[in-house]
Image (cartoon, helix red, strand yellow):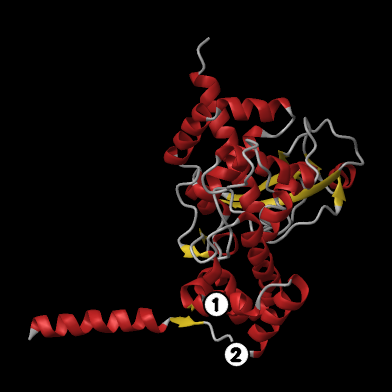
Amino acid sequence: MRNILRQLFFVTLLCMAVCNVYALDINRVEVHAFIDKMVNEHQFKRSDVETILKDAETQQSILDAIAKPAERVVPWFEYRERFLTDKRIHKGITFVQEHTLSLTKLEEQGAPVSEILGILGVETMYGESAGRFRVIDALATLSFDYPPRSSFFIGELEQYLLLAQEQHLAIKEAMGSYAGAMGAPQFMPRSYRNFAVDGDSDGKIDLWNDWDDVLFSVANYLKQYGWHADEPVVVNATYTTKEPPPYSVNDIAMNETVASLKAKGVVFNTTLPDTAPAVLITLQGKDGPVFRVGFNNFFVITRYNHSPLYANAVIELGQAIMTQLTIAKPQ
């Protein structure tokens, strides 16, 4: 009797899992409109688009994941601990040792090597965790069953089909994040098409397996968003007023300058002119608020992910790796 009950229990669990996955209905009005767009604007064959979308699955786990991204639900000190780990730092050191020539070339071109290392470490731990969802499932789910951002993801689904056609991707097999971000650098389809480059000049762009493509693509992404070589990214600050500002957990805007922040009682050091754009970042530390001032390059990092927590984790991870490499370097 106990074995029968145990079997029924596992059958119930399996049913619950299956019931949270649905084949996409291509006869829905919004899905049909998307198919029309791909046919009319991009000259896809209707049968090809229908075949692709018929295979897509709407998954509740994807909707659950996007509803609670870590950047929105955990304080800075917990978020930091997820990424500033010995394992991640050591993997970053090993990664540098394996790709020294490419990283040196990027550094000579003015690319921010430390921040690139931080991005790859935070995003996928240098390719180790590049996503467990099929990209087509993630984008289809969020396009047609996540109303808050459906227009954005419909655009990304469009870009994904175009990308797959251009780069000859296995469109039904490519794996990525719950949001449809792909490869070691976690590029969304639009970013893949706009910023990815052929780093080793082999005639194709592979962000899953070709590390030259990955490194030079991240560098190009930052460059295209306005990275300024040899300028500071962020500095520590103190706040002299009695009522500090609330924690900055949402998207940031460069609506201050060096001079305006100092006039409001923010104390920090920088060689940038008073007119340089700046933003005050307030993070939730274990013992109270942590203040930092970000400049243009900090804002550029947030174009990769619009969270100040993300940008700070990228910066600190990259710095930790570079510091350990300096310490380990023979004198």
> Which label lies toward us, 1 or 2?
1
Q: Give the image quarter of residue 42.
A: bottom right
Q: Quadrant of the N terminus?
A: bottom left
Please report the residue visible at 64 percent of the width from the left and 33 percent of the height from the top: 113
Residue 286 seen from this side: no
Q: Is residue 213 left or right of residue 37?
A: left
Residue 167 seen from this side: yes
Helix, strand or loop status at disc 2? loop
Query: How far apart in space, not on screen, are marks 1 and 2 (Cα)?
Result: 13 Å
**Outermost residue, right side:** 275
Image height of 223 relative to 7, above or below: above
What amino acid is found at the position of numbered circle 1 in the picture? Answer: Thr
Q: Which mark is residue 250?
A: none
- Residue corresponding to mark 2: 27
Q: Give the image quarter of residue 19.
A: bottom left
Between 115 and 298, the residue placed more toward the observer is: 115
Between 134 and 306, the residue placed more toward the observer is: 134
**Outermost residue, top side:** 331
Q: Position of residue 74 (x, y in %)?
A: 54, 60
- Residue corresponding to mark 1: 51
Asked if marks 1 and 2 touch (Cβ < 8 Å), the reply is no
**N-terminal-most mark, 1 or 2:** 2
Q: Position of residue 107 (x, y in %)?
A: 68, 28
Q: Position of residue 212 (x, y in %)?
A: 60, 37
